[in-house]
Image (cartoon, rainbow, N blue to C red):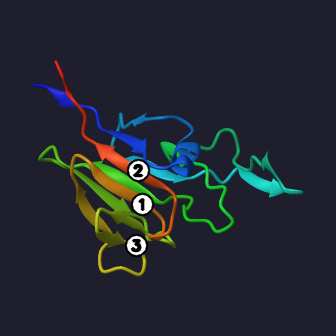
Amino acid sequence: MTETTPTLTPQTREAREALQTDEVRLDRFPFRVGRESRFGLVRGQWRSMERRQLAAPPNNDLYLVDTGDVLNISREHFNILLKDDGSYALVDHNSTCGTIVDDTNLGVDCEQTQCDLKDGSTLIVGTQESPYKFTFNIGQAAS
């Protein structure tokens, strides 16, 4: 049996900065994504503000850094699931600004909180104006 390794890749400079790399491999499921909340502005400069106890398990598998004046990314924003049939889905965790998958709005003020992902799906983390745009790639089959 062959397996694929899906990835998230940034579509914008801001998404690249939030991701802090050019690509993230989704190597476990559910794959949890949220905002890095251990940074904050102190006298106009971003500083580490560690508040979590070292023994506490992380809430997310991927932490995105949201440095905008208006936050688009919630602390525990969404999960990507591997479904029983081998397909993928995104579940928004009732985030304040929601998630847009292609043309489907997900979140607290939307009709749904989950939708299927396909190869090449565009994910906007936050509102339509959010600069945090990513591409979900299913990847190549590994032998």
Q: Earlier in the sequence, mark 1 or mark 2?
A: 1
Relative to residue 26, is residue 82 drawn left or right?
A: left
* Label 1 secondary element: strand
Looking at the image, which is closer to me, 113 or 129?
129
Q: Earlier in the sequence, mark 3 or mark 1?
A: 3
Q: How far apart, in angstroms, are the residues tagged by discs 3 and 1?
A: 12 Å
* Tag of residue 107: 3
* Tag of residue 111: none
| Residue 57 visible at all | no
Relative to residue 49, is residue 12 drawn left or right?
A: left
* Image quadrant containing the N terminus: top left
Q: Amino acid at mark 2?
A: Phe
* Label 2 secondary element: strand
* Image quadrant containing the C terminus: top left
| Residue drawn at 33 percent across, 43 percent down | 29
Residue lying farthest to the top in this orientation: 143
For mark 2, what is the residue?
Answer: 134
Mark 1–mark 2 CB contact (< 8 Å): yes
Q: Earlier in the sequence, mark 2 or mark 3?
A: 3
